[in-house]
């Protein structure tokens, strides 16, 4: 909408007369206000994009990494869970990538539903999704991972299973973020090697 149209709408029912200088001043104010509003939108969208995965709407990996480090400075314990959708390539090859994307989104929604705000979830990469639960030790988190694993099979179409690796830290057994993730990744690998569709806790066989 042009400045003149804005002015017409504003003064259409008001018999107000103003000088050319006043008109130019008002025109400048409208122009700068419009620019300020327009410039604020991309910045907000950019910030949202940085912390959000475009497909699943979960947090980004970078954002979850930062959250884990922040929580480690203030909490006494926490658990990191890494999920990997089993045989995901077969889903894409059989049903197409659009269906594969839908399965990813269904998996993400299921994770959030089971978590009920008790932790943070992110798309870790490809078909890998991650969860960090602050203030919770491995044994408690194992039950949540178990519930997520069962619900994903029921909520996805076509149905898929997930393998999980679980890693925890405590104040008397501190781990940095990279070590926490490495241990969860190793546990996930063991779950895959043992036949998939199961959970392995770091430090167990």
Image (tube, rainbow, N blue to C red):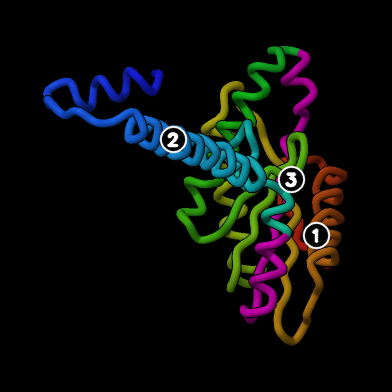
Percent coordinates x, y for residue 37 in the rendering? 46, 39
Residue 77 on the magenta segment: yes
The local crowd at label 2, few if under 14, some if 14 to 19, many if 20 or more residues have their Cα within 10 Å, is few
Residue 124: which disc?
3
Residue 32 on the magenta segment: no
The local crowd at label 1, few if under 14, some if 14 to 19, many if 20 or more residues have their Cα within 10 Å, is many
Vertical placement of residue 177 versus 100, above or below: below
Residue where numbered disc 1 is placed: 181
Q: Between disc 2 and disc 3, whose residue precedes?
A: 2
Of the residues tagged 2 and 3, which is closer to the observer? 2
Q: State which region is magenta.
A: 66-93
Look at the image and tell me in which quarter the N terminus lies. top left
Vertical placement of residue 135 versus 15, above or below: below
Residue where numbered disc 2 is placed: 28
Percent coordinates x, y for residue 85 in the rendering? 72, 36
Q: What SS does tag 3 mark?
A: strand
Percent coordinates x, y for residue 124 in the rendering? 74, 45
Vertical placement of residue 69 versus 46, above or below: below
């Amino acid at each position: 909408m042009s400045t003149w149209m804005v002015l017409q709408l504003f003064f259409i029912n008001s018999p107000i007369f103003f000088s050319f200088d006043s008109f130019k001043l008002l025109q400048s104010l409208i122009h700068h206000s419009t620019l300020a509003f327009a410039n604020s939108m991309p910045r907000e969208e950019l910030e949202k994009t940085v912390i959000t995965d475009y497909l699943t709407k979960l947090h980004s990996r970078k954002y979850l990494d930062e959250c884990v480090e922040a929580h480690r400075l203030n909490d006494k314990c926490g658990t990191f869970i890494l999920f990997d959708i089993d045989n995901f390539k077969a889903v894409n090859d059989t049903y197409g990538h659009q269906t594969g994307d839908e399965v990813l989104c269904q998996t993400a929604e299921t994770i959030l539903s089971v978590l009920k705000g008790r932790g943070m979830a992110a798309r870790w990469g490809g078909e890998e999704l991650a969860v960090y639960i602050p203030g919770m030790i491995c044994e408690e988190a194992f039950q949540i991972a178990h519930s997520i694993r069962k619900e994903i099979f029921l909520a996805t179409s076509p149905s898929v299973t997930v393998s999980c690796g679980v890693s925890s830290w405590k104040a008397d057994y501190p781990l940095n973020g990279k070590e926490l993730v490495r241990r969860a990744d190793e546990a996930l690998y063991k779950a895959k090697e043992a036949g998939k569709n199961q959970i392995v806790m770091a430090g167990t066989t």
